[in-house]
Image: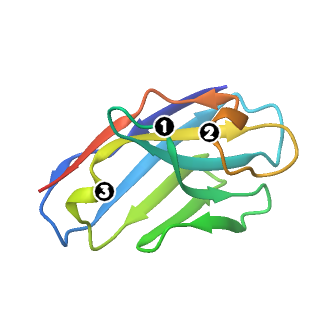
């Protein structure tokens, strides 16, 4: 499984940003996919998750998750950004059943993309 994030940037507060995660090699048609955020000194925090049927399981306010099955790209749309949204954003995949809360339960991770809101 390979996950490659893109789209991170430095933006002004109240702005919007869309992150993308190109997924490949997933040997399972309906995985749980998600976005997590990490800031220095803290654990990775769940931002949004989606199950294998395309249903949003969880999404923080102002964030939405979508998946394009034709291109195998997972997106995170972020709106009305605030400085507290600053962090490294990671795409993650879990191949077992369920769409859990904690990062430790996801098996595959991208390298992350930095979002800075000022």
Measured Cα–Cα span from mark 1 to mark 2: 8 Å
Closer mark to the observer between disc 1 and disc 3: 1
Q: Determine the residue positioned at 56% across, 66% down.
A: 59
Question: Residue 54: image x %, image y %?
Answer: 72, 63
| Residue furthest front as drawn | 41
* Marks 1 and 2 in Cβ contact (< 8 Å): yes
Q: Which quadrant would the C terminus be assigned to in this image? A: bottom left
Q: Residues within 10 Å of mark 1 (few under 14, many from 20)?
A: few
Q: Determine the residue positioned at 81% across, 31% down.
A: 27
* Marks 3 and 2 in Cβ contact (< 8 Å): no
Measured Cα–Cα span from mark 1 to mark 3: 14 Å
Sequence-first disc among 3 and 2: 3
- Kindly indicate the quadrant of the structure image that contains residue 11: bottom left
The answer to whether one can see residue 71 in this image is no
- Kindly indicate the quadrant of the structure image that contains residue 66: bottom right
Compared across the picture, whether 25 is left or right of 117 comes to right
Q: Provide the residue designation for mark 3.
A: 85
Task: State the scheme by which the image is colored.
Answer: rainbow
| Residue furthest right as drawn | 97
Closer mark to the observer between disc 1 and disc 2: 1
Q: Determine the residue positioned at 83% across, 50% down.
A: 98
Sequence-first disc among 1 and 3: 1
Q: Provide the residue designation for mark 2.
A: 103
Compared across the picture, whether 25 is left or right of 88 comes to right
Question: Residue 20: image x %, image y %?
Answer: 44, 48
Q: Provide the residue designation for mark 1.
A: 43
């Amino acid at each position: 499984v390979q996950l490659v994030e893109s789209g991170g940037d430095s933006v002004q507060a109240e702005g919007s940003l869309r992150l993308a995660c190109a997924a490949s090699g997933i040997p399972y048609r309906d995985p749980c996919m998600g976005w997590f955020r990490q800031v220095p000194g803290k654990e990775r925090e769940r931002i949004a998750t989606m199950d294998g049927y395309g249903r949003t399981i969880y999404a923080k306010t102002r964030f939405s998750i979508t998946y394009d099955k034709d291109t195998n790209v997972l997106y995170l749309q972020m709106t009305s950004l605030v400085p507290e949204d600053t962090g490294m954003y990671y795409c993650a995949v879990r191949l077992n059943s369920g769409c859990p809360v904690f990062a430790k339960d996801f098996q595959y991770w991208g390298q992350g993309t930095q979002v800075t809101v000022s």
